[in-house]
Image (cartoon, rainbow, N blue to C red):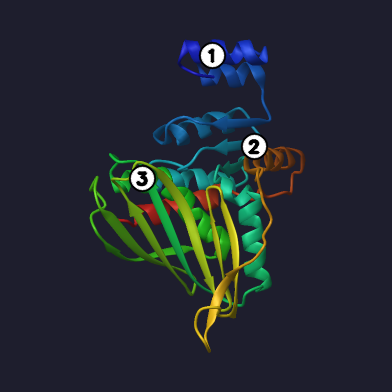
């Protein structure tokens, strides 16, 4: 379903399936088990309600879950009440590299996780607060996924409404301090984390997965330094394929709760809404 005819024609030509310009008509005529909502965030609640009314088993909703905290809470409530299983497309929860990093944290491979540093840059002319709402929702959810804790804002340095400069957001995920650096003015996209442990570090992000372990320093006598380990090369992390598999499992298994739910999506919006 799309309101642009050219996109409908392209999709129909590629997949040989019926297309629609009205979501209610589509739901009535196709009776799908799974629906993906990829409209603008201000319409996510309305589209979710349409799908629930038509008995859709699983709804996959793009991020952010909604454009306001109130709407996000309503969508999350629909999931908690069992009206439909609602997945938020926070893809890092399904990505093999982030799953591996979470395993390292849980198994304490490098000791306790002591801090998280996150970096997000997204183009030259976007307001920093808009960048946070666009990709910062992924960033906030990734921190919560890795740590298993909610994310609480502590302090902000810089101007979120600016299209230049850098903003530093101090936060906490449980007992783990988190520092988020979000900047404008760059001509490139950066989305990455440094996870600092007692005896090591993991760097993870777009096209990045590195593990570093503490060892005898080759530079300074009597000191330890971080030494890069050989780590798996993950050319494809399978994030979208794994999410679709999760949606199918959720549709087939009545008691199964998806990996990334509307409750998780609501928590990310709650953090974003606190950035004032």
Quadrant where the C terminus is found in the figure: bottom left
Which mark is first along the chain, 1 or 3? 1
Which mark is first along the chain, 2 or 3? 2
Taking the spot 25% from the left edge, 52% from the top edge, the residue there is 165
Taking the spot 66% from the left edge, 35% from the top edge, the residue there is 57
Q: Which residue is mark 3?
A: 131
Q: CA distance from mark 3 to mark 1?
A: 29 Å
Q: Is residue 275 left or right of residue 260?
A: left
Q: Which residue is mark 2?
A: 58
- Mark 3: give few (<14), some (14-19) or many (20+) Cα within 10 Å: many
Residue 275 sits above or below residue 225 on the image: above
Please tell me whether mark 3 sits on a helix, a strand or a loop: helix
Q: Are marks 3 and 1 in contact (CB under 8 Å)?
A: no
Residue 160, horizontal then vertical, whole percent = 26, 52
Q: Tell us which disc is closer to us: 2 or 1.
A: 1
Please tell me whether mark 2 sits on a helix, a strand or a loop: strand
Q: Is residue 109 left or right of residue 177?
A: right
Taking the spot 50% from the left edge, 19% from the top edge, the residue there is 2
Q: Is residue 78 left or right of residue 268?
A: right
Residue 196 sits above or below residue 68 on the image: below
Between residues 93 and 183, which one lies in front from this camera angle?
183
Q: CA distance from mark 2 to mark 1?
A: 23 Å
Residue 91 sits above or below residue 2 on the image: below
Asked whether residue 226 appears in the rendered view, the answer is yes
Q: Are marks 2 and 1 in contact (CB under 8 Å)?
A: no
- Mark 2: give few (<14), some (14-19) or many (20+) Cα within 10 Å: many
Q: Which residue is mark 1?
A: 8
| Residue 19 picture quarter | top right
């Amino acid at each position: 379903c799309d309101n642009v005819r050219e996109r409908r024609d392209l999709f129909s030509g590629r997949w040989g399936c019926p297309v629609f310009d009205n979501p209610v008509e589509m739901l009535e005529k196709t009776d799908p088990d799974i629906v993906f909502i990829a409209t603008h965030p201000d319409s996510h609640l309305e589209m979710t309600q349409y799908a629930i009314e038509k008995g859709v088993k699983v709804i996959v909703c793009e991020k952010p879950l909604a454009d306001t905290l109130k709407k996000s809470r309503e969508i999350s409530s629909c999931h908690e009440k069992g009206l439909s299983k609602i997945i938020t497309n926070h893809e890092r929860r399904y990505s093999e590299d982030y799953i591996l990093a979470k395993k390292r944290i849980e198994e304490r491979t490098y000791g306790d996780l002591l801090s998280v540093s996150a970096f997000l840059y997204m183009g030259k002319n976007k307001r920093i607060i808009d960048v946070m709402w666009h990709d910062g929702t992924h960033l906030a959810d990734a921190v919560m996924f890795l740590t298993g804790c909610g994310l609480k804002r502590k302090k902000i340095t810089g101007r979120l409404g600016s299209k230049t400069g850098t903003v530093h957001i101090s936060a906490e995920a449980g007992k783990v301090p988190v520092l988020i650096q979000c900047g404008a003015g760059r001509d490139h996209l950066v989305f990455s984390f440094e996870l600092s442990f007692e005896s090591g570090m993991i760097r993870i992000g777009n096209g990045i997965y590195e593990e570093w372990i503490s060892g005898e320093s080759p530079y300074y006598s009597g000191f330890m330094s971080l030494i890069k380990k050989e780590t798996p090369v993950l050319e494809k992390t399978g994030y979208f394929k794994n999410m679709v598999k999760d949606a199918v499992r959720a549709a087939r298994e009545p008691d199964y709760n998806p990996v990334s739910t509307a409750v998780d999506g609501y928590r990310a919006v709650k953090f974003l809404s606190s950035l004032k």
